Image: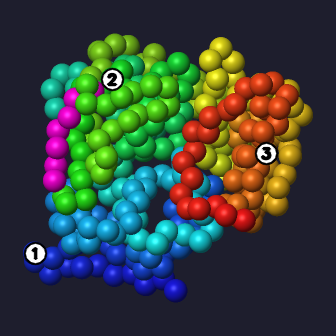
Amino acid sequence: MTSTGRMGLSGELRGELRRDEPLAKHTSWRVGGPAMRLYRPADRDDLIAFLRTLDADEPLLWLGLGSNLLIDDTGWPGTVIETQGCLTAMEQVEPGRLRLEAGVSCAKAARFATRAGLVGLEFFAGIPGTVGGALAMNAGAWGGETWPHVALVRTLDRSGTLRERGPQDFEVGYRHVAMPAGEWFLEAEMVLERGDTEAAQARIKELLARRAATQPTGLPSCGSVFRNPPGDHAARLIEACGLKGLRIGAAEVSPKHANFIINTGNAEARDIARLIDHVRAEVERRHGVRLIPEVRRVGDFQS
């Protein structure tokens, strides 16, 4: 049973707390069991105050658009912090430099940059996630990546301590970022160049049209399931194995784009996990290439 409520007297928490909240409502695959608690902070200060109420051993999961997470059907045995719709501040702090909070969707960030007269972030329009998620995995699309534009980030730990860090504090690679343990991204300052914003806006429209034409954008998915291996494309390898349209339960390798797995209606998280594992095994058996998932699994996923 789900219960909601706001903590609201002066000096108390002001965000929204939900108990036994089905996480299928909060992930792009539309799967996942209940969280013991889900908290949507009112703002940065409220988030810091909330973190300071948690026990040191409380399991903690941060959630943006939920587009790179596969959460087990048993759910999450602790607290989920949802940033989408909460940490959404965007501003130009100086010419060519934007501050973007973790809950801003990548698509909104791309449009905000062009309105500010800046170019270089157009590829963000093709990423189905938030700035926080993009920072966590060095998200990219159409030749662009997140971290080349990052000047600094601010992080929070579970005690509510705010830190400012530069790119040198992180190990950044292709769809991978190693960061200090126990910290989460709160916001980033990104540096972009002034340029032809009309051309940038046209580029965003072009990329979105290409995405709609080549990807199953109207169906529940996580975006790309696997990283592209060096010099190749995961979709090509999967399609060459004849796996388009393959189903396990209601999870299906998209007939439109082989590197997408879609929920055709009532898939369970474990259907999707089994299909990912099967695709990975087949590609390795037939091509000798071990695909690396972009998606993060949350839970034990025991059968």
Mark 1, other Cα within 10 Å: few <14 / some 14–19 / many ≥20: few
Label 2 sits on residue: 149
Region rendered in magenta: 161-167
- Asked which secondary structure carries label 3, the reply is helix
Q: Is residue 233 left or right of residue 123?
A: right
- Evaluate whether residue 178 shows in this view: yes
Residue 90 x %, y %: 27, 41
Q: Is residue 54 left or right of residue 75?
A: left
| Residue at the (44%, 25%) spot, across then down | 173
Q: Earlier in the sequence, mark 3 or mark 1?
A: 1
Q: CA distance from mark 1 to mark 2?
A: 37 Å
Circle on res. 278: 3
What's the residue type where badge 3 is placed? His
Q: Are marks 3 and 2 in contact (CB under 8 Å)?
A: no
Label 1 sits on residue: 11
Residue 199 x %, y %: 45, 16
